[in-house]
Image (tube, helix red, strand yellow):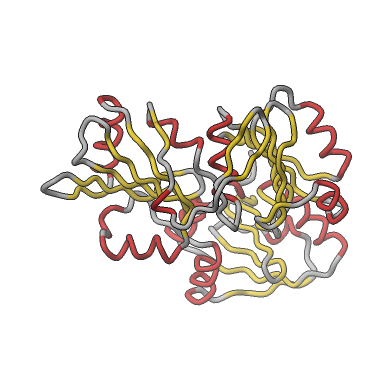
Amino acid sequence: MKKIYSKTGGLTDLKNTISFLQNFTGYIEIENNILFYNDSDLIFSTNNGKKSDLRTILKKLPDVFTIQVYECHSKDSLNMIIENKLDDRKNETLKNGKISESTKIKSDNKKEGIILNQYNDLYNFVGTGLYEINLISKKYKLDAGTLIFNNSEELYALYATKNKTIEGRRALGKIKTLFAVSELTGFIKKISIDTYNNYLEKYPKAILKTYISFDNLINSIKEKNKFKIIKNDSLMNILTECPSLIEVNEGIYIVSKHNSPIYAFYKNYEGDKAYRYIKNQCIFENIEFKIYNMNNDEFKKFKEFKGNKLKK
């Protein structure tokens, strides 16, 4: 799976986006709705993880919304993504470009595995959120690997043999090497943060990258650092030289450094789109800015939210 397009707009923009997609297999995320396409034919649509009619979705859309387009490499990868994104966890299969529904799966452990020929195949089956992938080798049946992805990036790796368990970067290297010498079967499912924390408690050294929730990061900065208040000034005047978190309104933030905006957070919008909305709000409203100075370690933690970084 690969993100190929992102835009904030209205119904006209959505229709134009769809019209430009040729031979498209993948899905379009619109707020809390997802439209699934196979070879440019709409085959399935959901609202909040439940099957929904397209007309119903379009009627409920706001005037302005975010459009994000993700391309899949095959019908099989699209099929797995549909299964993972449905709340009721039904097993769906694609036949001749159409969805047919089979028996509900009672347990994730009973899912059929997916044959994987190369490591990069994994990226077709992971998306937003936490995904667990258990890997079994066809050639080395006593070896097994476990990967956890967060937002399509490797977060956690374990490699188990008959005699030992390897954690972290070494485990990831072992798994990649295994792909070079053997066909693997993958068992893939979306997991909760609680499930991830259970893994972390058992094998803490397996972590590849620290997972930081946005709310926890913001709260830790607010608890640790004092703030100063600036009222009714222009946004450009309050940008800071040192790393700072600027709270524009509750839940709306800018990260500033070298008198420039670096990251912007406004509702569900990312990066430059978020910053444009913040600028407009500052023009038309009287804003009370709260500015929290940060150290460099706190500033670096925002790298976790690369989608919110502004383009230079």
Residue 302, x across and y down, in percent: 51, 55
Query: Quick one: 63 or 227, which is closer to the camera?
Result: 63
Residue 44 drawn at (x, y percent): 71, 42
Is residue 92 in view? Answer: yes
181 on left or right of 293? left
x%, y% of residue 102? 57, 45
Tell whether 16 sits left or right of 36: right
Q: Which residue lies furthest to the left in this view?
A: 163
**Can the viewer see residue 296 in this picture?**
no
Q: Residue 299: x, y in percent?
A: 49, 57
Closer to us: 266 or 189: 189
Residue at 40%, 40% (x, y): give it: 113
Residue located 39% across and 60% down the image: 196
Q: Residue at x 43, y 30 (%)?
A: 120
Residue 89 located left or right of residue 59: left
Is 76 left, or right, of 65 in this rendering? left
Closer to the camera, 252 or 163? Answer: 163
Quadrant of the rendered image containing residue 78: top right
The C terminus lies in which quarter of the figure?
top right
From the image, which quarter does the N terminus lie in? top right
Q: Which residue lies furthest to the front in this view?
A: 103
Residue at 72% across, 54% down = 47
Nearest the eye: 258 or 136: 136
Name above or below for residue 211 compared with residue 233: above
